[in-house]
Amino acid sequence: MGVMTSNALAKEGDLQQELKIAAVSQRADIKNNQIIFNGPVKITQGSININADELRAFSAENGQTKMLIAIGNPATFSQELDDGRIGTASANEIRYDLATTGLLLTGNAKLDQAGSKVTGNIIRYNITAQELIAESTGKGEDRVITIIQPENFQTEDVPKQKLPEIPLKKQGNQ
């Protein structure tokens, strides 16, 4: 049995909120159970925000939306973390599986949580479990890059040392 963190609980609250899609126009492809939204498109669900140039929403047989595919240059995702900071992600394509709460970021994928950054060709992130898998193509110089900020680097916690005062020599009369 896994231990739930307060982070996961905060995110769970977002996932129970309604999903709102604002777009310039939309058209339904009923045969393929999808709605295509033309942008700019803004999707909100609690503190989750997704911005895209185009969005495809796929529904299951019961009409429930099951998958969102946000396309952009880049498409962006953001969510408030439990400590009030904002976690952000961007990619050419963001797939948001509402059933599994999984994000699949493809093409120039970037994820930034509290200053720690991961970049790669593909990033998989589960919102509820907070699990992340990043992949590169492995070709040429393409690599997964991770930048982790030092945890105890807090400038305000470092006591300021007072420099000794150096008496200035007075210039003599000229």
Image (tube, rainbow, N blue to C red):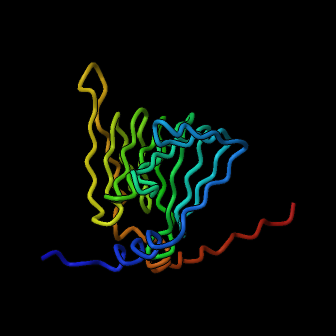
| Residue at 59% across, 43% down | 52
Residue 102: image location, x then y, percent = 34, 54
Residue 131: image location, x then y, percent = 26, 58
Seen as rendered, the residue at the extreme top is 140
* Quadrant that contains the C terminus: bottom right
| Residue at 50% across, 76% down | 156
- Rendered view: 146 above or below 17: above
- State which quadrant residue 100 falls in: bottom left
- Rendered view: 50 above or below 105: below
- Rendered view: 132 above or below 90: below
- State which quadrant residue 143 falls in: top left
Towards the viewer: 103 or 65: 65
Q: In this view, does 95 lie to the left or right of 72?
A: left
Residue 86: image location, x then y, percent = 51, 64
Residue 3: image location, x then y, percent = 20, 78
Seen as rendered, the residue at the extreme right is 174
- Rendered view: 101 above or below 151: above
- State which quadrant residue 130 falls in: bottom left
| Residue at 46% across, 50% down | 89
| Residue at 71% across, 42% down | 25
Towards the viewer: 68 or 75: 68
